[in-house]
Amino acid sequence: MEYKMKKLINMCKAGDEKAKEEMLKKLKPLIFVSIKKYYFGNEEWNDLLQEGAVKILNEIERFDEAKGVPFLGYIKLQLKFFYMEKRKKVRKEISQTVDKV
């Protein structure tokens, strides 16, 4: 499994569109779980899924295997902090709206 994932990561970094689609297909359940666990806003699910997919594609480019961090663990943490940050922004907007009333 680990070898297949490394190969897929390298193909994604090389710009292989089919590899990117396959990666996103494999990681879609992780995106769903991250949204359910860390985001509590009213944004559309499709928008949240798209943003998660974009985040993953960006993080594939930044991922450095030489640092010894497992790819899936890295992506999981990146999604966690991404959706937590979105949640924080939504709460801030709500509190600013309430303060104005």
Image: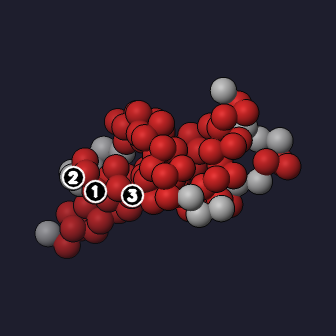
The residue beneath circle 3 is: 51
Q: Is residue 26 left or right of residue 101?
A: right
Q: Residue at x 48, y 39 (%)?
A: 27
User: Is the Cβ of the residue at disc 2 closer than 8 Å to that at disc 1?
Assistant: yes
Q: Give whichever of discs 3 and 2 has the lower sequence position.
A: 2
**Which quarter of the rendering shows the C terminus?**
bottom left
The residue beneath circle 1 is: 47
> Which quadrant holds residue 73?
top right
Using the image, tell me which numbered label, if any, was put on residue 44: 2
Circle 2: element type:
loop
Closer to the camera, 9 or 87? 9
In 3D space, how far apart are the residues under numbered discs 3 and 2 (Cα atoms)?
11 Å
Q: Residue at x 25, y 61 (%)?
A: 94
Residue 73 in view (yes/no): no
Q: How is the image coloured?
A: secondary structure
Amino acid type, mark 2: Glu
